[in-house]
Image (tube, grey):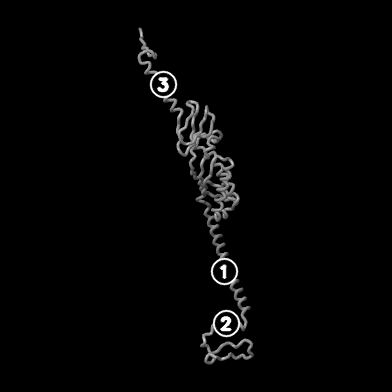
Amino acid sequence: MTTSFKNVTPSGPGGPATLLIVLSFTGFLLLTQSLFVVPSGEVAVVTTLGKVSGTPRKPGLNIKLPFIQSIFPFDVKTQVQPEQFETLTKDLQVIKATATIKYAIKPSEAGVIFATIANRNSEVYRKIVLPSLLKSLKSVFSQYELETIATEWNAISERIAETVTEELNTFGYVEVQALDLTGLEIAEEYRAAIEQKQIAGQQLLRAKTEVEIAEQEALRYETLNESLDNQVLFKLFLDKWDGRTQVVPALPGSNSGIPPVIVNGN
């Protein structure tokens, strides 16, 4: 049985058209493999045969070597991550709360992160941010007793935010923008005891204030009594006399114990 084959060499029928199609397809493939776009709010880590090369590419149109270089996007926008945690206080009481951290990957560090820590953007929080966050929370709360934490929550929250920022700055991979602590949970019996102690403290402060006011009033009257003699009292009477009173105090220095009588204003 004989099979015939059609000649499709460039010099044969249809050869130039076939070659043009092949070249066009190859050029299009090379072009699409060479150009890539980095969206706004992201950077792209470029690897050459698996090794990070150059600085992360910025948003916009970029070029890479086809088939040799690969790209890995990293989101550098602000990330908001709430984390529920549980830790011990200085007096070994359990507290629960929620720490909401706002952070962003530093664009210049995306290549280092990819090469040494995380191959994907989603791993940054778990491998970089979370360990430092939990370490700072346990370190700070372990220095305070439960009552202090409950009454000075805002001040302690600010200290934790500073500690987390300092901890993450030692690595330099991310920038902490804010940290909020909310939803403090403690055992109900301890909460009631703290509230009772606060009420007792307010009552004691009120009592001390009342005593201080009474002591100041007593001192004022004592000083006033020491400064008032007969001359001053007589002068105060004359300043206030309305002219109708018929009997006035005796003149200071008078030997007579009988008060003088005012007749017709004289």
Within the image, what quadrant is residue 250 found in? Answer: bottom right
CA–CA distance between discs 3 and 1? 98 Å
Residue 71 in the image: x percent, y percent? 49, 31
Q: Report which residue position mark 1 lands on.
A: 210
Q: Which secondary structure lies at badge 3?
A: helix
Q: Which mark is residue 53?
A: none
Task: Tell me if mark 2 has few (under 14), some (14-19) or many (20+) residues whose alpha carbon lies within 10 angstroms of its own.
Answer: few
Q: Where, by quadrant of the figure, is residue 61 drawn? A: top left
Who is closer to the viewer here, 234 or 11? 11
Tell me what residue is drawn at x 50 percent, y 50 percent: 182
Q: Quadrant of residue 229?
A: bottom right
Out of 45 and 202, give the one closest to the viewer.
45
Say whether disc 3 or disc 2 marks the residue closer to the N-terminus: 3
Residue at image location 56% in from the left, 45% down from the top: 165
Disc 3: which residue: 23
Q: Looking at numbered disc 1 in the image, what kind of residue is underneath it?
A: Glu
Q: Amino acid at mark 2?
A: Leu
Q: Is residue 213 above or below residue 254?
A: above
